[in-house]
Amino acid sequence: MSFEELQIGMSTPTEIVGEAVAGEAAQTLKQVKSLIKGLTTNTFDLAEALYKVKANKYYAPKYNTFAEYAKDLDLKISKCYYLVKLVEVMIEVKVPRSAYENVGIAKLRAICRLKLVDADGKTKMYEGVPAEDMVKSLVCTSDQYTPLKMWERIEGLLGLMGDDARVWQNVSLTVAQRKKWQEAVELAKLNIGSVGKDEEGNYKDASEGACMEVIAMSYILDPNNSPEGEGPNVQATDSDGPSV
């Protein structure tokens, strides 16, 4: 190879790499849309494509964040996130697709609720077992669980039992009632403040469930809402005692 040829080879990698990345980004974004529209789409193909978009920020520069990009897809944003989370967790614990694909989305979605590290970046422990090992164990033994039993197993590991167990409350409201309820929830979120950060690093508001509790307790603890002589902070007076 001549010196001139060597110089040419040394001067082009950045441009070539840039074009390759741009090409892969465009191809991946196109793949995501195609998979969403496909009637026979393999959900794991879609999960991997969405993961690539998020991990490599292929959504830029058209979108500032993955959340903005996900909102523009013909797919529920919650599904976008749990599909990405699924791939992220499996990569983190070094479990290949060939090992987890047969587990199924429902069970994997439950398993991937387990956090691998705590707020300080230290390995989370579940029943004395490191999170990574617990996830691998659950993937390997997933055939012993139905989707519901797997969900219950994860709830137990997360300590969401008893009063902390998750339940759903469906309520029919008029448009006017829903508007008032939403106003109350927004006020509760404002008073509670942020409760952490999401996967994009943005501060998160309290959940609607947490707001419901605050709103309910505010009403319950207000003595003006209780019948006379009942409710919180009711103190006995001389007239309450037995007559002599």
Image: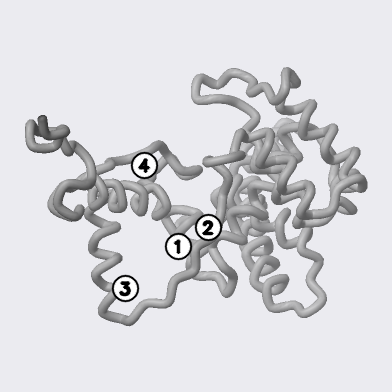
Q: CA distance from mark 4 to mark 1?
A: 23 Å
Q: Label 4 amino acid?
A: Tyr
First-in-chain label (3 vs 2): 2
The quarter of the picture where residue 133 lies is: top right
Residue at (22, 54) in percent of width and height: 187
How dense is the environment of label 1, judged by Cα within 10 Å: few (below 14), some, or many (20 and up)?
Answer: few
Location of mark 1 (residue): 62
Q: Nearer the viewer, residue 25 or 87?
A: 87
Q: CA distance from mark 4 to mark 2?
A: 21 Å
First-in-chain label (4 vs 2): 2
Q: CA distance from mark 3 to mark 1?
A: 34 Å
Q: Nearer the viewer, residue 57 or 243?
A: 243
How dense is the environment of label 2, judged by Cα within 10 Å: few (below 14), some, or many (20 and up)?
Answer: many
Residue at (28, 52) in percent of width and height: 215
Q: Label 3 amino acid?
A: Arg
Q: Label 1 amino acid?
A: Lys
Q: CA distance from mark 3 to mark 4?
A: 25 Å
Q: Residue furthest front?
A: 244
Can you tell which of label 3 and label 4 is closer to the viewer? 3
Circles 3, 2 touching at the beta carbon (< 8 Å): no
Location of mark 2 (residue): 59
| 184 to 164, vertically: above or below | below
Q: Which mark is residue 142?
A: none
Circles 1, 2 touching at the beta carbon (< 8 Å): yes
Location of mark 3 (residue): 178
User: Residue 99 vs residue 176: left or right?
Assistant: right
Q: Which mark is residue 203?
A: 4
